[in-house]
Image: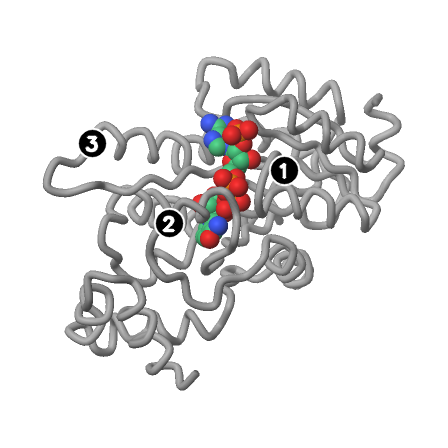
Amino acid sequence: MSGEQLNEVRKVIWLTGASSGIGRSLALGLAAEGHQVIASARSDVELAVLETLSSNITALPCDITDASGLSFLRARLSHLSSHLDQIILCAGNCEYLDFPEPDWDMVTRVMEVNYFGAVNCVKTALPLLRQSAAERPHIVAVASMVTDAPFPRAEAYGASKAAMRYFFDCLRLDLRSEHIDVSVVNPGFVDTPLTQKNNFPMPFLLSAEDASRRIIENLESRPKNYSFPKRLLCLLAVSKILPALWQKIVLNGADGKARQDVLNEKVGE
Ligand SMILES: NC(=O)c1ccc[n+]([C@@H]2O[C@H](COP(=O)([O-])OP(=O)(O)OC[C@H]3O[C@@H](n4cnc5c(N)ncnc54)[C@H](OP(=O)(O)O)[C@@H]3O)[C@@H](O)[C@H]2O)c1
């Protein structure tokens, strides 16, 4: 697809994490709305399948942690479009520390994808966002509601998402004079390959389709932060108001069922 072709349609969006879960649903949802989606992930096979589902989707396989390949990645993006109107940084990795003998290297591994990977994408895409004819180009970072409360074993994942959230909250200030908006999206639990390996209760679990629909609808108003579902956000507020109770909730009961019951009781389900 040539740059000229891409420029004829609505928004040109670079979306990472498009091969699976929330990102895949976002790609299909945005393409269905007529936007031109440049879809990235490492899995070229999955991206090729995605391309067959909509003529508005163009695959751009890449590893966002490959800092040495960023100029080449920018060149490949520029080849597809002379500009970007929006980037949605959805690629992510979640691994948990196992005590008493954690794999400490994993902290670096998770940070490399979730934090440095996202920064790499901003570095790559910013010149193309500056070329946008849109009144306000838009950077969207998919962080997580995990940053609203401490969870056992989530040191690496939570810290990477907190770093991400802080980075983008600051970036918003620095790009304001250039009229580039920055939104941070914080999903709760969403049923995807990333969470399907979890062996603990996930209250208010949403489908990837539901999550992507909410994200697409809410991004229209360019929120600084968008956290969903609200019921989970209220529940996580317990960690700040009553930290001792929160600790009891997340640590209580070795089996997940006990914790699920406490959680449901707290929100009056
Ligand atoms: N599911 C949830 O409950 C939940 C909650 C809060 C936040 N989130 C966040 O939402 C985002 C999407 O998560 P998901 O649940 O949809 O997970 P997922 O199904 O596992 O998707 C993760 C995506 O990231 C891509 N990715 C991973 N490492 C990459 C790398 N080095 N370079 C390029 N792409 C890479 C994966 O593609 P390849 O493997 O093909 O590269 C895949 O497309 C993540 O940032 C996650 O942290 C998820």
Which one is in front, 266 or 72? 266
Q: Residue 248's spot in the image, x, y percent?
A: 17, 71
Image quarter (top left, top right, bottom left or bottom right) of the C terminus: bottom left
Sequence-wise, which precedes: disc 1 or disc 3?
1
Looking at the rendered structure, the kind of residue marked 3 is Asp
> Would you name the residue on which mark 1 appears?
15
- The residue where tag 3 is placed is 103
| 218, above or below 124, in the image | below
Marks 1/2: CA–CA distance: 25 Å
Quadrant showing the N terminus: top right
**Is label 1 within 8 A of ligand 1 (CB to nearest ligand atom)?**
no
Q: Residue furthest left?
A: 100
Residue that carries the numbered disc 2 in the rendered image: 198
Residue 238 appears in which quarter of the rendering?
bottom left
Q: Amino acid at mark 2?
A: Asn
The location of residue 247, given as percent across then percent down, is 18, 68
Amino acid bearing label 1:
Leu
